[in-house]
Image (spheres, helix red, strand yellow):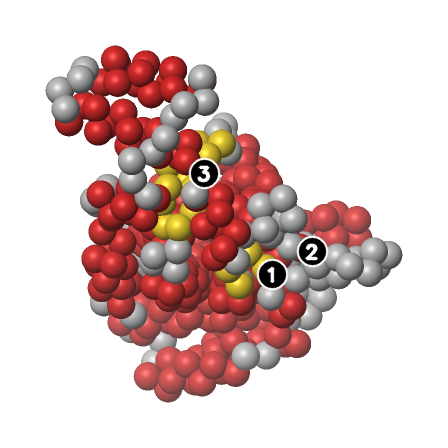
Amino acid sequence: MTLWSGRVGGSLDPAVWEFLHAADADLLPYDCEATYQHAERLHGAGLLSDDELSWVEERLAVIANDPAGYLPEDEDVHSAIERQLGDVGRKIHAGRSRNDQVAAAFRLYVLDACAEARAEIEALALVVLSFAEVEAETLLPGYTHLQRGQPVTLGHHLLAWVEMLDRDRSRFMAAASAAAESPLGAGALAGSTLGLPAPPGQMRNSIDAVSDRDFALDYLYATTVLYVHLSRIGEEIVLWSTGEFGFVRLPETAATGSSMMPQKLNPDVAELARGKAGTAIGRLTGLLATVKGLPLAYDRDLQEDKAPIFAARADVRLGLRALTALVAGLEVDRERMAAAASDPLVLATDAAEALVREGVPFREAHERVAASVRDGSFTPHATAAESVAARAAPGPGGVREAIAEARSRFGSSL
Ligand code: ARG
């Protein structure tokens, strides 16, 4: 029995039924919550009794935790819930449509996914911060174009990862505030005549309320940028763990072996983070394409909005947890890093700046030092450690203060 069987005579062709079916079981607890919010509104308007409301509340708590109650013959999660609410279920759809219902449930889902992403991002950031603390003074060359540039510390480099993660956290918070409005009351697209009380945070326009999926796009965008960051972090771990760099050793708890080459320890976690960034970009692009050109208000195309979000949420959780385990177990080869950082040429910029302090115009200082590099006569006046200490914030000189400041930023939100 469908929610619309009064209008459509015969039964649907099985192929049509299968095609229309929504893979939306993940929405179950959220749709129960949205259904309760709507039941409260009906109660507020005198359309549900006190007893009916408390019965609905009890039943929804059971339904929300029983995925097996959603049967193959239910068209979607909304139909499954209404059927399980029995006789009161036959009253509960007054003043709403699946259009405002699905938007309400999906918003609750995205809100939860944002909170989860934020907590997992913070867990990774705290591990990176502890790592930065331990390696605050560990020297390594900083790179541009993947060529040695100027000496920095590993602590300073790791704090760059923390900044990326902090911005990711903000993007999920922004997606959460976009999701935190209520489309309830919009009905199919134009409200209802029943005079139901407004839900908290009710959206201003009923047509927008059932058409808007910006919050889902915002979530996917936050996910995509996060994964782009995880892929850059992953790429650095891939490079640093090569025999050629040899800066870090992978922990055996977060690396894999080769089925053929007995000596191998592979950075699969870091590589998969890089790989899943491509998938994340695809999901965002896919939903943008779904929404583009859709006439207002609701269209069934919008059913395609859920699968990418469900998959993105799993990837965010799994990827952040795996990367947290990987980073927590990395072992630094400080000697290899220091050897790379002791390349005298990484001090060429300092030499040019020393001439500037003596009054030489920078362009001339640059040319003089470049000439000495070219003819092989360049010798630095300082050590890498002195060079690092002389370059204050936002450079690597103030790394201890920067760690303390980042800690208070992350600590205060926990
Ligand atoms: N399964 C649908 C979705 O995910 C629910 C809304 C259906 N609305 C409708 N008018 N057919 O979008």
Work out which quarter of the rendered image holds the N terminus and state it. bottom right
> Is residue 308 in sight in this rendering?
no
Q: Give 101 or 408, whichever is nearer the viewer.
A: 408
Q: Badge 3: how crowded within 10 Å, few (<14), some, or many (20+)?
A: some
Name the residue carrying label 1: 250
Label 2, secondary structure: give it. Answer: loop
Q: Badge 1: how crowded within 10 Å, few (<14), some, or many (20+)?
A: many
The residue that appears at 65% across and 68% down in the rendered structure is 252
Q: Badge 2: how crowded within 10 Å, few (<14), some, or many (20+)?
A: some
| Nearer mark to the viewer, of 3 and 2 | 3
Q: Looking at the picture, which amino acid does disc 3 mark?
A: Asp
Residue 266 disc label = 2
Residue 343 disc label = 3
Q: Give 323 or 283, whichever is nearer the viewer.
A: 323
Going from the N terminus, do you reach mark 3 or mark 2 first?
A: 2
The residue that appears at 75% across and 57% down in the rendered structure is 264
Image quadrant where residue 394 sits: top left
